[in-house]
Image (cartoon, grey):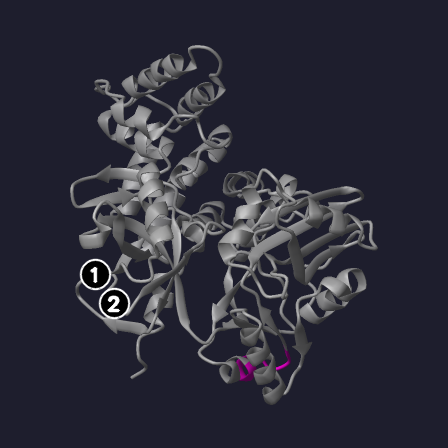
């Protein structure tokens, strides 16, 4: 039996070091001591997650919950999980007071360090997708299994705690038991940026080149007449995209898993603004703006899993089932043909092209080198840490953004710059209304946020700088748009920012 205090202490030890090796060692040491019944809960807590989802406790309740801490650590991991479950189940008349009473009881049984951890855990402040990679290494170390086997199981299960339990109780045999399951989303495969189209073609050899659409990533599963649609962050949006469900239900197959993009088009066939596409995912009137799907991968077809097949075979399967809805592209184009395709994509209002090795297998959740994205402008997806109150005509609005990149070693996001450029009146109004809902604190100067909002930044480049913790600073950064389809785990890493430094 492991005390909750040990989880808290390990989390603090991980946060206190920048060494990835030290983080893995600390996490693996605790994981190896867990009883079977504690594995899922402790793994989730260490990753800053709540098993079962949100507990129904708002930040205002947490910030006003004051109770004297316990003198001695006595809470177990299982007791904390049970208490959070009870919080989650409270509903009905008088639920606000009963929830406050239950929260007070939990905090009263916790030490001062445990209280701080619980408030941050329940408030979502500990959620760090960046820690997933470190956690996966720690699970492999604690279980004595290969890290690639753990990563594949996580790709297929989509759940860190479940993967941890399988590894620590059944080793590689249990991990190998995970299969692609219709109705359970896979983590999407990601691409790395390329400096140029020629470089990407040279690096990958036999390749597919296709449009990089200015749309929203979707993953679609069909099993008979049952269809599910998920976003990049694995949020299900099936009920909001009826036209996509109807289209997939009409494909010539019994079962299929497709990866692709969707976007809304204007009457002229050009992509509508990205925010309009994203707005459909929560629309109350789903038929107000129709979405068009463009698929670029097929991961399962009629009982056959294709994850480990090379891309060229997956594309053959895609043509079999959804050729009319395939993303525009070419197989093995010449450099001139690829350049023409890039120009066409840009002329049609899209972002650029994707270059993919025809021999690549589907490696979900990782930015591999076998898929490369080519865009004419430098852009980064960064996390908003804070926003300063504006001056002059922006008085009363939240303006200047503090921007951070994801720590590749699992720490909190690392600041790399600020910008107030590119903010329209509409975006200023949205920020001023939305950011306080994500605040950890505020003062007369700024509002400081949970690291969860992602913004796409266009920039002219990067330079070395001692002003920010990352040792780099953005040059002429400007806001393009917010990315509600991404969370902090999908933000660009500090390594990606440093890769934009001028080559010596």
| Location of residue 428 in the rendering, given as x and y in whole percent from the top left corner | 32, 50
Task: From this view, report whether residue 58 is shown above or below residue 306.
Answer: above
Q: Position of residue 433 (x, y in %)?
A: 34, 41
Q: What residue does disc 2 label?
A: 472
User: In the image, residue 466 lies at what x, y percent?
Assistant: 17, 66
Question: Camera-side residue: 374 or 22?
Answer: 374
Which residue was labeled with disc 1?
468
Kindly check if marks 1 and 2 are in contact, taking CB atoms under 8 A apart as contact: yes
Describe residue 486's horizontal placement relative to residue 335 as left or right.
left
Could you tell me how far apart the alpha carbons at marks 1 and 2 are, in whole angstroms?
Answer: 7 Å
Q: Is residue 220 above or below residue 502?
A: above
How many discs appear? Answer: 2
Residue ID at (81%, 53%): 302
Picture quarter with the N terminus: top left
Residue visible at 39% across and 64% down in the picture: 380
Q: Which residues are magenta?
A: 201-207
Which numbered dot is residue 296?
none
């Amino acid at each position: 039996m492991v005390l909750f205090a040990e989880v808290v202490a390990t989390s603090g030890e991980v946060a206190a070091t920048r060494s990835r090796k030290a983080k893995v060692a600390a996490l693996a040491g605790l994981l190896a001591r867990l009883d079977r019944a504690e594995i899922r809960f402790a793994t989730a807590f260490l990753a800053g997650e709540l098993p079962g989802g949100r507990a129904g406790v708002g930040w205002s309740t947490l910030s006003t919950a004051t109770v004297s801490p316990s003198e001695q650590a006595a809470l177990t991991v299982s007791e904390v999980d049970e208490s959070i479950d009870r919080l989650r189940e409270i509903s009905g008349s008088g639920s606000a007071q009963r929830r406050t009473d239950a929260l007070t009881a939990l905090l009263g049984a916790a030490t001062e360090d445990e209280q701080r951890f619980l408030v941050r855990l329940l408030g979502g402040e500990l959620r760090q997708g960046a820690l997933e990679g470190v956690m996966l290494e720690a699970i492999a170390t604690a279980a004595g299994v290969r890290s690639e086997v753990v990563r594949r199981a996580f790709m297929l299960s989509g759940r860190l705690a479940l993967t941890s339990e399988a590894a620590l109780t059944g080793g590689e045999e249990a991990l190998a038991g995970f299969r692609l399951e219709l109705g359970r989303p896979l983590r999407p495969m990601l691409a790395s940026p390329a400096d140029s189209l020629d470089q990407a073609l040279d690096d990958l050899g036999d390749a597919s080149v296709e449009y990089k659409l200015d749309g929203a990533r979707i993953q679609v599963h069909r099993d008979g007449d049952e269809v599910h649609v998920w976003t990049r962050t694995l949020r299900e949006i099936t009920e909001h995209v009826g036209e996509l469900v109807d289209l997939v239900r009409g494909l010539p197959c019994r079962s299929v898993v497709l990866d692709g993009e969707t976007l809304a088009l204007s009457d002229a066939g050009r992509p509508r603004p990205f925010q309009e596409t994203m707005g459909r995912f929560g629309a109350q009137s789903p038929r107000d703006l129709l979405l068009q799907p463009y698929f670029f991968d097929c991961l399962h077809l009629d009982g056959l899993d294709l994850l480990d097949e090379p891309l060229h075979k997956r594309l053959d399967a895609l043509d079999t089932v959804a050729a009319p809805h395939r993303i525009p592209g070419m197989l093995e184009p010449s450099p001139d043909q690829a350049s023409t395709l890039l120009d066409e994509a840009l002329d049609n209002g899209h972002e650029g092209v994707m270059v993919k090795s025809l021999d690549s297998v589907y490696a979900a959740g990782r930015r591999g080198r076998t898929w490369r994205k080519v865009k004419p402008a430098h852009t980064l997806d960064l996390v908003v840490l804070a926003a300063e109150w504006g001056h002059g005509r922006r008085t009363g609005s939240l303006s200047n953004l503090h921007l951070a990149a994801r720590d590749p070693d699992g720490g909190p996001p690392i600041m790399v710059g600020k910008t107030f450029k590119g903010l329209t009146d509409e975006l200023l109004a949205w920020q001023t209304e939305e950011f306080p809902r994500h605040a950890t604190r505020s003062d007369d100067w700024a509002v400081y946020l949970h690291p969860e909002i992602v913004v796409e930044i266009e920039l002219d480049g990067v330079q070395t700088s001692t002003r920010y913790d990352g040792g780099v600073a953005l040059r002429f950064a400007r806001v393009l748009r917010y990315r509600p389809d991404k969370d902090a785990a999908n933000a660009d890493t500090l390594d990606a920012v440093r890769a934009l430094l001028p080559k010596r």
